Amino acid sequence: MKIIIILTLTFFSFNSYASSSKLKDLVTVKGVRENPIIGYGLVIGLNGTGDSGGEITNNSLKRMFQKLGLNPQNEVSSKNVAAVIVTSKMGAFARIGQKLDINVSSIGDAASLAGGTLLVTPLKGGDGNIYAVASGQLSIGGLKSGAKFATGATIPNGAIVEREVELNFDRKKSLRLSLKNPDFTTAARIERTLNEELGGKFAISRDATTVDLIVPMHYQRKVVQLMAIIENFDVVQDVKAKIVINERTGTIVAGGNVMLRPAAISHGDLSIQIGGEGNQAEGEGAPKRLYFMDNKAKLNDVVKALNALGASPEDLISIFQTLKRNGSLVGDIELL
């Protein structure tokens, strides 16, 4: 005789506890961001694992010799050289002389960059200006265990900033704060918090992403001090009810504020009723039955109950999608 598992759960409606976050974790400041920089260079000193030739690498070698005062007449080719792209990110307040970490990636048919040295390489921004100069010994992790990506390398502190991005941050008369996760409720809360804490109508929310802040008179030329204060204000972030599903891995991530309305669904040998009262199943071959007695049942509790009955991730995904289509699941479903 089969053992029939009958699980009756009673859910009580309550307001979920919402913790506050620092303002610095919720917004970015217009103009305060990293700037990508990129350059083309040569890696030398390879042990026969470089490019097999090609117009780009050979011409680059020839131009390099010419800059060094040599004038080769014939084509220059070497398996100890590789053409690479060098990338990095320069902080918003990077200053001349500051060092940056860089990434080096082969663009030819080099087998490995291990043991190579990057020659002096200018790094340009999107405006075409040179902002940093890179060079140095390449570092490739995992060589002893067999590096999987020996055509990519890094150089810690491999670039030096040569040009600064002018922001004049301390002279700003206003600041634009952009929410990392756009939300009207959170934007309104940020506006209210800033105005209450600063003691005046200095902030206004423009939309779900943007909050503009006028710098108060007593903080003129003290914008850094102002930011140090406001970025530590506590704001409760409003979160949308959402389920994120990765069907490839069977991973399901659901927010605790996802609610379920009354519904009944049958999936395989699982018969599920949400809201209302159900009858216990008895007898040989009777399906497992799961009853949720409250129409505001939390989804995380439903997941725990289904897992206890042995439901697979595929079962959960199918059930959630069906509940969403039926309108019984209050929240969004995002598939990865």
Image (cartoon, grey):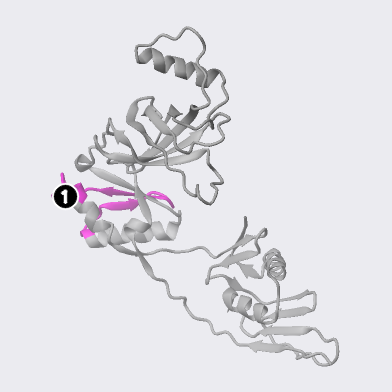
Tell me the residue at 49%/49% (across/down): 142
Residue 288 x %, y %? 76, 84
Indicate left or right for 49 with 159 as reference.
right
Q: Is residue 326 left or right of residue 98?
A: right
SS label for mark 1: helix
| Residue 147 visible in the snapshot | yes
The N terminus lies in which quarter of the figure? bottom right
Please, which residue is most extreme toward the right here?
284
Give the left or right position of residue 33, taking residue 317 as reference. left
211 within the magenta span: yes
With respect to residue 194, does 269 lie above or below? below
Type of the residue with mark 1: Tyr
Q: Which residue is mark 1?
A: 219
**Residue 274 in which image quadrant:** bottom right
Measured as percent of width and height from the top left, residue 172 is found at 23, 41
Counting from the top left corner in percent of width and height, residue 73 is at 47, 7
Location of residue 224 with respect to 312 vertically, above or below:
above
Q: How many marks?
A: 1
Q: Please report the bounds of the magenta region as a residue range.
A: 198-224
Position of the C terminus, as image quadrant, is bottom right
Q: Residue at x 52, y 72 (%)?
A: 256
Image side of residue 147 versus residue 223, left or right: right
Asked if the magenta segment contains residue 2, the reply would be: no
The residue shown at (77%, 89%) is 4
